[in-house]
Amino acid sequence: MDKSADCGFFFLSPLLREIVYTIIQIMITFHIITIFPDLIESYFTDSILGRAQKTKKIAVKFYNPRDFTDNKHRKVDDIPYGGGPGMVMTVQPILAAWEKARGRSKTKKFKTLIMSAGGEKFTNVLAKKYSKKYTDIILIAGRYEGVDARVKKILRAEEVSIGDYVLTGGELPAAILVDAISRQVPGVLGKTESIEEERISATETYTRPEVFTYKKKNYKVPKVLTSGDHKKIDEWRESRS
């Protein structure tokens, strides 16, 4: 889609968007560059994301930089210039893994993201944007003290953060991005209505039984939810969203 078509697409109703994407059959492929693929690979094979892969709504591929090193010890890190603790992931193995992920396609729309605590805060707005704009998203999950800054410059990549805290590696952030972006792909959740931002969603939810007793105290479902009055239910949910 061109820019004008892409902008117009956002004004379509959720149902029309799903119909358009179903006809076009767009699949997003996530390429995760990590030295520890086993840490998160199983997360994508079960439940909703597993089903999404089987139905070819999404695809998740892994690339281990150790498989692309140009040294016999498969070393992917080295000491930082200027001194300091820890190690830094080197440029060559990551670029080689990226080139493998990128391939030679001229029709696919790629986006390269580096998981970094100092990056742009990842939001649902970004998840929706990425899901509509790109066919392939390359996620670089760093380790140790991070990735050599020249990787970002060479690939013109963007750094993304999932919050104001530091983790031991970029694998969990990468998994979070895949999950959040995949949810925006029509058909992944089954129904468009399942996407919270497309409906009125409350932070409080209840299910059976209507009354639950714990240590002789009864905990009841709010009456409005059992009233059958959908207008009042929506108002209640909106007040708690």
Image (tube, rainbow, N blue to C red):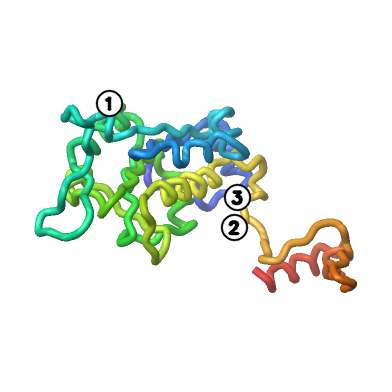
Regarding mark 3 in the picture, which secondary structure is present there? loop
Local packing at callout 2 (Cα closer than 10 Å; few below 14, some 14-19, many 20+) is few
Looking at the picture, how far across and down is residue 34, in whole percent?
34, 40
Give the mark nearer the N terminus: 3 vs 2. 3
Seen at 66% across and 66% down, the residue is: 203
SS state under label 1: loop
Disc number for residue 104: 1
Residue underneath mark 3: 13
The C terminus: image quadrant: bottom right
In front of the other: label 3 or label 2?
A: 2
Coordinates of residue 120 in the picture (x, y in percent): 34, 60
Q: Position of residue 131 (x, y in %)?
A: 46, 44
Quarter of the image with the N terminus is top left
Query: Image quarter for residue 57?
Result: top right
Looking at the image, residue 238 sits to the left or right of residue 165; the answer is right
Residue 72: image location, x then y, percent: 18, 27
Distance from label 3 to label 2 (Cα)? Answer: 13 Å
Q: Is residue 8 above or below residue 31?
A: below
Q: Amino acid at mark 3?
A: Ser
Q: Taking 235 as reference, is 67 above or below it?
A: above
CA distance for labels 1 and 2: 36 Å
The kind of residue tagged 2 is Glu
Q: Which residue is mark 2?
A: 197
Residue 26 showing in the rendered view? yes
Residue 45's place in the image compared with 177, above or below, is above
The foreground one among 229 and 172 is 172
Q: Considering only order in the chain, which callout, 2 or 1, is on the residue closer to the N terminus?
A: 1
Name the residue rendered at 31%, 48% in the picture. Answer: 142
Q: Earlier in the sequence, mark 3 or mark 1?
A: 3
